[in-house]
């Protein structure tokens, strides 16, 4: 039965909800090995065995949002708030460029005040200037207006990550206060696409009240949206958040949670063969080689931390975030070793766009003719 479903997935890139759910429920190691072997074959064929590096700069934990799961939500008064000075953010990006990272992700808590929007625009322009426009720039700065998305795009950002968190509206409502809107978030994903960004989204895996069915639907949501990139990872409890009260009832053992994250990556690769999929840091919070396991399950992007060490401790979306004591060059060396150990190459010095995005651009040209 398993062989039959995996063959169908490899041959067609399509599975129905029941089949996806069945694969997400696999627990036996020998079955998991089969699933990961299958998704790794698809990865090798469609995107190759290159891991793309994206240096991530987490430049501020000041946030206007209040998501019930997140350690830097505005109501968490225990978090010491910071914003890295503009020039230091730029320097981190320039460092990443010199370290031959093809691309950098700028992430922070959400803000939409004019001062913030202007600052980000200036930073983007300056990074582009200082790196001869060679460094790829991804933003992960939450929900913004059409005008803001446009301004940042015109300044030189070309990719944007905005997780839907869960594609199930009822569950979304339970995880957020009333003024956080699922429909608005979907509309933002649409806006980002129309503005011209390569769009990435993702979910948290192993949330309280989340079912295997929900996760199967998340994967089909990504597929329907025709997204270019996925960044999804395990949900990890944070004590100073409202969701912590669900801990005793809903917390999964780390191994089980890690496996669920890996199964999601494998299925995403089987269903969306030529997109970029990140092995996120939260995987590493569960097992020291969690990200390498992510690459072996089908991911092809890794995001070494390029944030100044002094700020890392305060950017704790979840507990026990790894690498908060390391500096950027330690993260580079550590990851390079880890990736090479599993026999993969690192895509230094290139943007590493997904073939999926390239194919869509080609189609556009064809239809425009
Ligand atoms: N565990 C895992 N991921 C989390 N995020 C926020 N809080 C947590 C948590 N407790 C993720 C959200 C958000 C991204 C920046 O961090 O998915 O989109
Ligand atoms: Fe929404 Fe941090 S407050 S993800």
Image: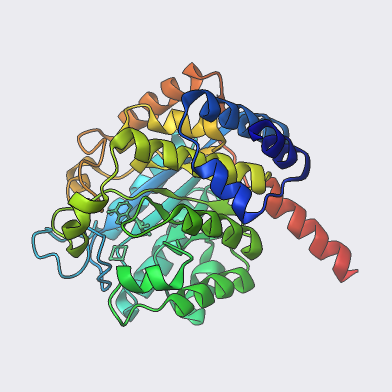
In the image, taking residue 209 as reference, residue 66 lies left or right, namely: left
The structure residue drawn at horizontal position 54% and vertical position 68%, both measured from the top left corner, is 153
Give the quadrant of residue 118. Answer: bottom left
Q: Position of residue 119 (x, y in %)?
A: 35, 69
Q: Nearer the viewer, residue 246 or 166?
A: 246
Q: Position of residue 235 (x, y in %)?
A: 33, 50
Q: Residue furthest front?
A: 1
Query: How many labels sit on residues?
Result: 0
Q: Nearer the viewer, residue 264 or 163?
A: 264
Report whether residue 97 is seen: no
Seen in the picture, residue 113 relative to 133 is either above or below; the reply is below
Indicate the colouring scheme: rainbow
Report whether residue 162 is seen: yes
Q: Position of residue 97 (x, y in %)?
A: 46, 41
The structure residue drawn at horizontal position 46% and vertical position 29%, both measured from the top left corner, is 293
State ligand 2's quadrant.
bottom left
The structure residue drawn at horizontal position 49% and vertical position 69%, both measured from the top left corner, is 152
Location of the C terminus (image quadrant) = bottom right
Q: Nearer the viewer, residue 214 or 192?
A: 214
Seen in the picture, residue 201 relative to 274 is either above or below; the reply is below
Location of the N terminus (image quadrant) = top right
The structure residue drawn at horizontal position 49% and vertical position 42%, both measured from the top left corner, is 25
Q: Residue furthest right?
A: 369
Q: Nearer the viewer, residue 106 or 73?
A: 73
In the image, taking residue 361 as reference, residue 241 lies left or right, namely: left
Q: Position of residue 214 (x, y in %)?
A: 48, 59
């Amino acid at each position: 039965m398993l062989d039959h479903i995996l063959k169908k997935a490899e041959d067609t890139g399509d599975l129905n909800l029941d089949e996806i759910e069945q694969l997400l429920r696999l627990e036996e190691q020998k079955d998991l090995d089969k699933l990961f072997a299958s998704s790794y074959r698809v990865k090798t064929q469609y995107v190759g065995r290159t891991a793309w590096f994206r240096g991530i700069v987490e430049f501020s934990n000041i946030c206007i949002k209040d998501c019930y799961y997140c350690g830097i939500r505005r109501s968490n008064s225990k978090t010491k708030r910071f914003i890295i000075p503009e020039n230091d953010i730029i320097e981190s990006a320039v460092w990443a460029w010199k370290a031959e990272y093809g691309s950098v992700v700028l992430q922070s808590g959400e803000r939409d005040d004019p001062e913030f929007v202007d600052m980000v625009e200036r930073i983007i322009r300056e990074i582009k200037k200082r790196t001869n426009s060679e460094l790829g720039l991804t933003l992960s700065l939450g929900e913004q207006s059409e005008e803001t998305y446009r301004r940042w795009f015109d300044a030189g950002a070309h990719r944007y990550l905005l997780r839907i968190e869960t594609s199930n509206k009822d569950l979304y409502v339970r995880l957020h206060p009333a003024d956080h809107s699922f429909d608005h978030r979907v509309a933002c994903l649409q806006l980002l696409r129309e503005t011209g960004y390569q769009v990435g989204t993702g979910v948290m895996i192993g949330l309280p009240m989340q079912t295997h069915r929900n996760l199967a639907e998340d994967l089909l949501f990504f597929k329907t949206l025709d997204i270019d990139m996925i960044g999804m990872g395990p949900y990890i409890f944070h004590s100073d958040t409202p969701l912590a009260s669900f801990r005793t009832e809903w917390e999964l053992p780390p191994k089980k949670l890690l496996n669920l994250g890996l199964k999601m990556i494998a299925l995403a690769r089987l269903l969306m063969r030529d997109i970029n999929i990140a092995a996120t840091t939260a995987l590493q919070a569960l097992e020291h080689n969690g990200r390498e396991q992510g690459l072996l399950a089908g991911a092809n992007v890794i995001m070494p931390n390029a944030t100044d060490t002094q700020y890392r401790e305060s950017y704790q979306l979840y507990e026990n975030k790894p690498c908060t004591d390391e500096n950027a060059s330690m993260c580079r060396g550590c990851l390079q070793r880890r990736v090479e150990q599993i026999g993969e190459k690192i895509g230094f010095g290139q943007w590493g766009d997904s073939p999926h995005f390239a194919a869509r651009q080609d189609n556009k040209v064809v239809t425009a003719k």
